């Protein structure tokens, strides 16, 4: 197998914001501004997409689309997505810094990767304006990746490959088989696959489980197992080559696979 030269991490649910909580309430509140009630589960469903695309996916969910038609007198359109997006972004900017805590074990994993000479890249479904609120908090905890590709940096975001291509250019690494993508969502895994990169999904720390470390610590192994299995099934269905609980387990996985 090809030895790795770089690892590209997602942000929320992967390296920071265990459980991926920052955007959830904001999506619900943004839709409420337009007199549409949505649930956290509906907000979580498209997670990993660029935020405009995420809002578009939510707005076209059948129940929400029907509610929009009933309240606003027309089927959802791109102009409606634009209006919600304009409300969402500043709201998410306002709360993002509160959810910048590193996932337990993330910093040790990055240190282990750097000790082996690997470069650290990053992509995200967040806009750059949102990430400007997250970066200082992550840096204070010791996490500063070698690059950052945001959802609004390129003409097309996830699930396409351009973000990963940009990482390879920024980091000066190739071929794609030597660049590992680590993510907690289906669009993020698809981003890596589209670029021809191997992928690792993180199950327990991510969006599909949606629990804090404290909440998981209060649960039994029997209670956690179905949550892990459901999240892992989504990630494997998206094409993840391997699934781990969180990035804390990545060095052990790379040891087993002899990839570094």
Image (cartoon, rainbow, N blue to C red):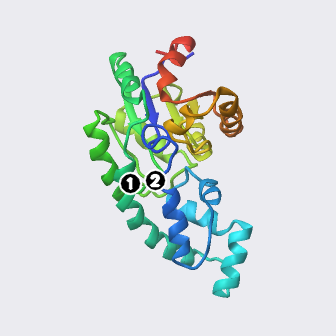
In this picture, residue 121 sits left or right of residue 38 = left
Query: Mark 1 — residue?
Result: 96
Residue 181 visible: yes
The 10 Å Cα crowd at callout 1, few under 14, some 14 to 19, many 20 or more, is: many
- The residue at the point 53 percent across, 26 percent down is 177
- Residue 228: x and y, percent? 66, 33
Query: Residue 39 falls in which quadrant of the image?
Result: bottom right
Q: How far apart are marks 1 and 2 (CA)?
A: 6 Å
Labelled pair 1, 2 in contact (Cβ < 8 Å): yes
The answer to which image quadrant residue 71 occupies is bottom right
- Residue occupying the point 27% across, 39% down: 139
x 43%, y 37%: residue: 15
In the figure, is residue 194 to the left or right of 173? right
Secondary structure beneath label 2: loop
Dot 2, how many residues are within 10 Å of its Cα: few (below 14), some (14-19), or many (20+)?
many
71 to the left or right of 108 = right
Q: Quadrant of the image for the N terminus?
A: top right
Check the image and report above or below for 116 versus 97.
above
| Residue 124, x across and y down, in percent | 45, 47
Q: In this view, does 33 lie above or below 170?
A: below
Q: Which of 243 and 170 is in front in this view?
A: 243
* Mark with earlier residue (1, 2): 2
Q: Residue furthest bottom?
A: 73
Instruction: Say which mark, if any, is on residue 236.
Output: none
Circle number at residue 22 = 2
């Amino acid at each position: 197998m090809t030895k790795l030269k770089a690892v590209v991490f997602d942000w929320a649910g992967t390296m920071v914001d265990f459980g991926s909580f920052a955007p959830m309430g904001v999506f619900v509140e943004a839709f409420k501004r337009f007199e549409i009630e949505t649930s956290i589960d509906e907000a979580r469903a498209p997670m990993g997409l660029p935020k405009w695309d995420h809002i578009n996916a939510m707005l076209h969910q059948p129940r929400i689309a029907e509610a929009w038609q009933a309240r606003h007198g027309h089927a959802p359109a791109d102009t409606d997505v634009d209006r919600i997006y304009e409300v969402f972004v500043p709201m998410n900017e306002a709360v993002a810094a509160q959810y910048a805590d590193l996932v337990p074990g993330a910093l040790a994993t990055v240190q282990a990767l750097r000790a082996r000479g690997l470069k650290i890249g990053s992509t995200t479904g967040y806009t750059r304006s949102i990430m400007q609120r997250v970066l200082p908090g992550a840096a204070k905890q010791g996490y500063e990746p070698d690059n950052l590709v945001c959802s609004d940096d390129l003409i097309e975001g996830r699930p396409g490959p351009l973000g990963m291509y940009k990482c390879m250019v920024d980091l000066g690494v190739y071929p794609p088989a030597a660049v590992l993508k680590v993510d907690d969502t289906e669009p993020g895994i698809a981003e890596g696959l589209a670029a021809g990169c191997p992928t690792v999904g993180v199950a327990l720390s991510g969006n599909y489980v949606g629990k804090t470390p404290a909440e998981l610590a209060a649960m039994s192994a029997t209670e956690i197992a179905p949550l892990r299995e459901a999240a892992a099934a989504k990630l494997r269905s998206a094409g993840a080559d391997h699934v781990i609980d969180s990035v804390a387990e990545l060095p052990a996985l790379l040891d087993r696979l002899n990839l570094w």
